[in-house]
């Protein structure tokens, strides 16, 4: 599945610190899928920067009138 492919799968996401000093991104999806992803704080900072950059790029695309392709 590519980044631009639509999906009908619903999921919940939680983000927070663990008692081991890690940052956990916890994804729970339909069908009982649970995916805990633990990161060092520095890695979490890198992920946050990537999220901010992606959000800014999405805003620029929206402002330019780009619309997601639908099937």
Image (spheres, grey):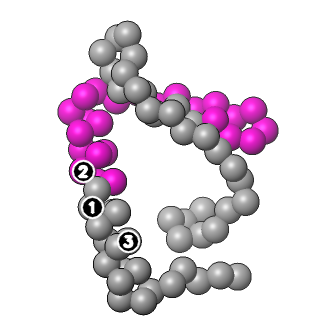
The furthest residue to the front? 63
Give SS at disc 2: helix
- Start-end of magenta stretch: 28-51
Picture quarter containing residue 29? top right
Give SS at disc 3: helix
* Neighbours of disc 1 within 10 Å: few (<14), some (14-19), many (20+): few
Front residue of 39/56: it is 56
Is 53 left or right of 8, judged from the image as shown?
left
The furthest residue to the bottom? 65
Q: Which residue is drawn at 38% across and 71% down?
A: 58
Q: Residue 4 carries which label?
A: none
Picture quarter containing residue 5? bottom right
The picture places residue 67, in percent across and down from the top left corner, at 51, 84
Is 37 left or right of 49, judged from the image as shown?
right
The residue that disc 1 covers is: 53
Whether residues under marks 2 and 1 lie with C-beta atoms below 8 angstroms apart, the answer is yes
As drawn, 39 above or below 7: above
Image quadrant occupied by the C terminus: bottom right
The residue that disc 3 covers is: 58
The residue that disc 2 covers is: 49
As drawn, 67 above or below 47: below
Whether residues under marks 3 and 1 lie with C-beta atoms below 8 angstroms apart, the answer is no
How far is the residue under mark 3 from the one under mark 1?
9 Å
Front residue of 57/46: it is 57
Q: Give the total number of marks visible in the rendering.
A: 3
């Amino acid at each position: 599945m590519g980044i631009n492919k639509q999906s009908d799968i619903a999921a919940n996401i939680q983000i927070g610190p663990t008692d081991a000093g890690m940052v956990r991104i916890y994804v729970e999806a339909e069908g009982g899928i649970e995916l805990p992803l633990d990161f060092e704080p520095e890695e979490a900072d890198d992920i946050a920067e990537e999220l901010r950059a992606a959000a800014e790029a999405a805003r620029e695309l929206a402002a330019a009138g780009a619309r997601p392709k639908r099937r």
